[in-house]
Image (cartoon, helix red, strand yellow):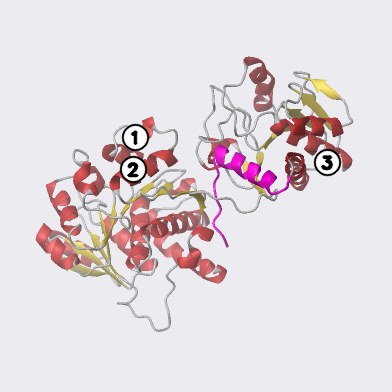
Amino acid sequence: MSPRPILTVAEMAQADRDAVARGATVSQLMQKAGRAVARAVEARFAKQPVRVICGPGDNGGDGYVAACDLAARGWPVTVEALASPGTDASREARARWTGPIDPWGRGGDETLVIDALFGAGLNRPLDAAVIRRLEPLVAGAHQVVAVDVPSGLSGDTGRPVGAWALSAVLTVTFQARKPAHVLLPGRERCGEIVVADIGLGEVSSRLFENDPGLWLGRFPWPSTEGHKHSRGRLGVVSGGPWRTGAARLAARAGLRAGAGLVTVVSPRDALAVNAAHLEAVMLVAADTDDEIEDVCAEMDAVVVGPAAGVDDATRDKVLALGRTGAALVVDADAITVFRTSPADLFSLLDVDDVLTPHAGEFERLFPGLLAASDTRIAAAREGARRAGAVVLLKGGDTVIARPDGRAAVTLNAPPWLATAGSGDVLAGFIAGLLAQGVSGFDAACAGAWIHAEAAERFGPGLISEDLPDLAPQVLSDLYARQ
């Protein structure tokens, strides 16, 4: 298994140029791309009339190739052209199409349409005439297959370039996903995404899909000589007597993630309620910041923030933990409490500490950054740079970023994760891996993937208490794949 890069439009263009420099031709790459579109259509749809709508650039050239290939295999194909081809390769592809070419706007009765108008590099809004032609494809019973990205979407942001963009049931892209395929709303507009290898070879990137190929080779499986102390010591700081559940969720998740010893660090007035619910997880009392520092001095990792309270006591505990040397997962209230002085938090973090904000918490630490950034990827990267730590920006398109710009986007998170306590479990999974010596970036990526995979396997009706006990099945499958 290898990491799967996500390429910007510029990186993809460079990969094409590099392939040409090694001896490939643009026409050869176009033939591979168009045939890949045709194979994806054949694999998913019954043979039927299909209309291919071609633009003037290389995306349109891919469409002509797909049309030729499908027609050769007995599909009834109609081609509609927006304009004459504007590149040598697209002119060559059009010349190979021997059927009629309908003028722009002719339309037809075909319910299966291949959108080969504009690719990921679109940099201006669609013309009104183009939108008028495409709107019936959304409103009617059509099934749209997009070449590269649905027309109107920016390949680099996943947002419409103007006010309108097409949606597809299937998108066929080439060599690697682009940001539009992984970021909302683009990801939803793309439908099923097929990544076709067109022979560009390895391409360099600092942005990846968050799947096991990115981190499984460094996963901390226990050894036969290991014992509970060698598998890492994790602490989870509990809230007060009426706010203890979040810490226990994180602690159980850390234990399921493989940490050898997990301890809930509890205020004295919450000891009884925590003790009534804990079994394998241990319990220790600590009220003051000095006690927190003393208790956690021997911990390998600590979670702080879930239901901690937004008050000076929480702030002092975080500052005390920063003096211990333990790897930190800073979540929820421990983020919000630094909203007026984020630099104080950043000053105690290092590259293996992990901040886990949702969008609102991110705004408290980095005011205006999300709104000012082109994408959540850019925002998370800049946040990580400022904090000097890993930032996991939660959401339907969770982004994990290191201070050096390396980043990943999680693709497997289902909607069932939108439930109270889910983030506490995620913090525990990440911290359980940190306690075993995994780097902050790998721990955040693996924790987020396991969290999402567990939720996907459970499905509707999921509550956060279900998640830790779903982890063993996910881990077992990962162990079999290593």
For the N terminus, give its image quadrant: bottom right
- CA distance separating discs 1 and 2: 8 Å
Identity, as a three-letter code, of the amino acid under mark 1:
Leu
Q: Secondary structure at mark 2?
A: helix
Q: Specify the quadrant of the image occupied by residue 274.
A: bottom left
Dots 1, 2 in contact, CB < 8 A: yes
Q: Secondary structure at mark 3?
A: helix
- Sort mark 2 into few (<14), some (14-19) or many (20+) by Cα contacts within 10 Å: many
Q: Earlier in the sequence, mark 1 or mark 2?
A: 1
The residue located at (51%, 70%) in the rendering is 479
Q: Which mark is residue 369?
A: 1
Magenta region, residue range? 1-24
Q: Is residue 76 above or below residue 275?
A: above
Taking depth in this image into account, of 108 and 174 the one nearest to the observer is: 174
* Residue extending furthest toward the top: 128
Q: Is residue 464 visible?
A: yes
Q: Please give the residue where the numbered disc 3 appears in the rendered image.
A: 69
Identity, as a three-letter code, of the amino acid under mark 2:
Gly
Q: Which mark is residue 383?
A: 2
The residue located at (50%, 58%) in the rendering is 214
Q: Is residue 159 above or below residue 469?
A: above
Q: Earlier in the sequence, mark 1 or mark 3?
A: 3
Q: Specify the quadrant of the image occupied by residue 97.
A: top right
